Image (tube, rainbow, N blue to C red):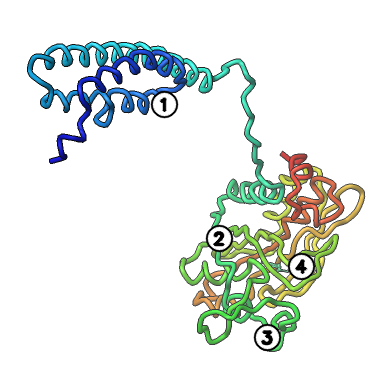
C-alpha cells in the first residue's frame, strides 16, 4: 500500500481538473491518428492519469468535500471522454477513406498481358512427324537420355572397337555400376532394343528424343540435338514396306509431289542400310537413315529372326526444322531469345 501522503490533496486535485479542462480540447484536436488518440486517452483518463489519481485520493478527503470533488472529477472525465469519442469518430472515418483511396482498383486500366509461351519449333516438328506415323498405326514412346553402353551400342551390333564408342565422340557419365558404363545416348536407336525386349512383335514404334554427341557448337552441329527413331517389326516385312512407309512420310511432311531416292549406306544395326534423300527446294537433301533390322539385333533382344523381319529409320529433327523454316544457323534453335522463337508460333 502506497503511503497516503503521495496522494494529491483536494486543492491540488481542483487545480489539476482546471488545467485538464483547459488543455484537453486543444490536445485532442491536435491528434491526427487513431493510434495517437489511444495514447492521449491513456494519458488523460487512463490508470496513470491525474483523473485516476484524483479518484484514488477521494478516500482521504474529508467527507463534506468528497461528494463535490467526486462530482467535479466525474464531470471532467465525462467531458474529456466525449471529446475523445468525437475525435475518434472523425479520425476513424478519415482513416477508412484514406485506406479505400489507397486500395482503389482502377478497372478501366488496360490489363497486363502475360507473355504467351509457344511450343518450340523443334518440338513442333517432332510432334508433326510423330503424328504422321501415329496416323499409320505406330505407337510413340520415349526412352532414357542417360543410357547404358549396352543398349546404345552393344545390343545394336556396334563392334567393341567402333569409333563411336570413343570418349572423343561420346559423353560418358560417372554414374551407377553398370558393367558396360553409362553415357548420354548418342542416338534414339537404343529404344529399339529396349522396346523389343519388353514387347512381343508386331512392333510399330516411333521414338522422339534428345541425343548427345561431343561436337563443336557451330552452324550445323550441336552437342545436343533431336532425333526421331522408327521401328516396324512383323511377319514378312520387306524393303518394299520400308520404301512405301518412308515415301508416304516424305509426302506428308514435305508435300505430295516430293521425290525420294534411296542410296546404299552402312549402319551396324541394319542390313541392308540406306539413306533416304528428298528433292526439296531445287536440290537433293539427305532426310534420314534407314534399313532392314539386322538379325543380330533380333538375337540380342530375344526375337527369332526366322519368325520376323523389320525395318528401322532415324532422322534429325533439328535439321528438318531448319529446312522447314529456312533457318541457316542451327544455333538459333538453341538461343532462348524470344524475338527469334516467336517467329515460329
Ligand atoms: N541412329 C542413326 C544415327 O544416329 C540413325 C539411324 C540410321 C537410325 C538407320 C536407324 C536406322 O534406325 O535404321 O545416325
- Identify the residue position indicated by label 1 in the image: 36
Q: Which residue is mark 3?
A: 159
Q: Position of residue 303 (x, y in %)?
A: 51, 74
In the image, which is nearer the foreground, mark 3 or mark 1?
1
For marks 1 and 4, give the one nearer the viewer: 1
Query: Where, quadrant-wise, is the N terminus in this rendering?
Result: top left
Name the residue tied to disc 2. 142
- Determine the CA span between mark 3 and mark 2: 25 Å
Residue at 83%, 61% (x, y): give it.
220
Q: Residue at x 69, y 68 (%)?
A: 212
Label pair 3/1, CB-CB below 8 angstroms: no
Q: Secondary structure under badge 1? A: helix
Expressed as whole percent of the image width and height from the top left, the position of residue 311 reads: 64, 65
The quarter of the image that holds ligand 1 is: bottom right
- Crowding at dot 4, Cα within 10 Å, few <14 / some 14-19 / many 20+, comes out as many
Left or right: residue 132 compared with residue 219: left
Q: Nearer the viewer, residue 72 or 286?
A: 72
Q: Nearer the viewer, mark 3 or mark 2?
A: 2
Characterize the local packing of mark 1: few (<14), some (14-19) or many (20 or more) Cα atoms within 10 angstroms.
few
Amino acid at each position: 500500500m502506497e503511503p497516503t501522503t503521495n496522494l494529491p490533496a483536494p486543492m491540488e486535485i481542483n487545480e489539476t481538473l482546471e488545467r485538464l479542462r483547459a488543455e484537453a480540447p486543444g490536445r485532442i484536436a491536435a491528434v491526427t491518428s487513431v493510434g495517437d488518440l489511444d495514447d492521449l486517452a491513456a494519458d488523460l483518463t487512463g490508470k496513470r492519469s491525474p483523473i485516476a489519481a484524483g479518484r484514488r485520493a477521494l478516500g482521504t478527503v474529508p467527507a463534506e468535500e468528497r461528494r463535490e470533488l467526486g462530482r467535479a472529477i466525474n464531470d471532467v472525465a465525462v467531458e474529456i471522454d466525449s471529446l475523445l469519442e468525437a475525435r475518434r469518430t472523425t479520425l476513424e472515418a478519415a482513416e477508412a477513406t484514406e485506406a479505400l483511396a489507397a486500395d482503389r482498383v482502377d478497372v478501366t486500366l488496360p490489363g497486363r498481358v502475360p507473355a504467351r509461351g509457344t511450343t518450340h519449333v523443334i518440338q513442333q516438328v517432332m510432334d508433326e512427324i510423330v503424328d504422321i506415323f501415329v496416323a499409320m498405326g505406330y505407337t510413340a514412346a520415349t526412352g532414357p537420355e542417360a543410357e547404358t553402353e549396352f543398349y546404345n551400342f552393344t545390343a545394336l551390333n556396334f563392334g567393341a572397337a567402333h569409333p563411336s564408342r570413343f570418349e572423343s565422340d561420346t559423353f560418358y557419365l560417372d554414374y551407377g555400376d553398370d558393367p558396360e558404363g553409362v553415357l548420354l545416348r548418342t542416338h534414339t536407336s537404343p529404344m529399339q532394343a529396349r522396346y523389343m525386349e519388353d514387347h512381343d512383335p508386331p512392333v510399330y514404334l516411333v521414338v522422339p528424343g534428345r541425343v548427345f554427341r561431343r561436337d563443336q557448337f557451330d552452324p550445323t552441329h550441336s552437342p545436343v540435338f533431336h532425333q526421331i527413331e522408327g521401328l516396324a517389326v512383323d511377319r514378312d516385312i520387306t524393303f518394299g514396306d520400308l520404301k512405301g512407309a518412308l515415301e508416304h512420310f516424305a509426302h506428308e511432311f514435305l508435300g505430295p509431289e516430293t521425290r525420294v531416292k534411296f542410296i546404299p549406306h552402312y549402319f551396324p544395326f541394319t542390313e541392308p542400310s540406306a539413306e533416304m534423300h528428298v528433292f526439296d527446294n531445287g536440290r537433293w537433301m539427305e532426310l534420314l537413315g534407314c534399313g532392314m533390322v539386322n538379325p543380330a539385333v533380333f538375337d540380342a533382344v530375344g526375337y527369332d529372326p526366322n519368325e520376323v523381319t523389320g525395318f528401322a529409320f532415324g532422322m534429325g529433327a533439328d535439321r528438318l526444322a531448319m529446312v522447314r523454316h529456312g533457318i541457316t544457323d542451327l544455333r538459333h534453335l538453341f538461343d532462348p531469345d524470344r524475338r527469334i522463337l516467336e517467329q515460329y508460333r
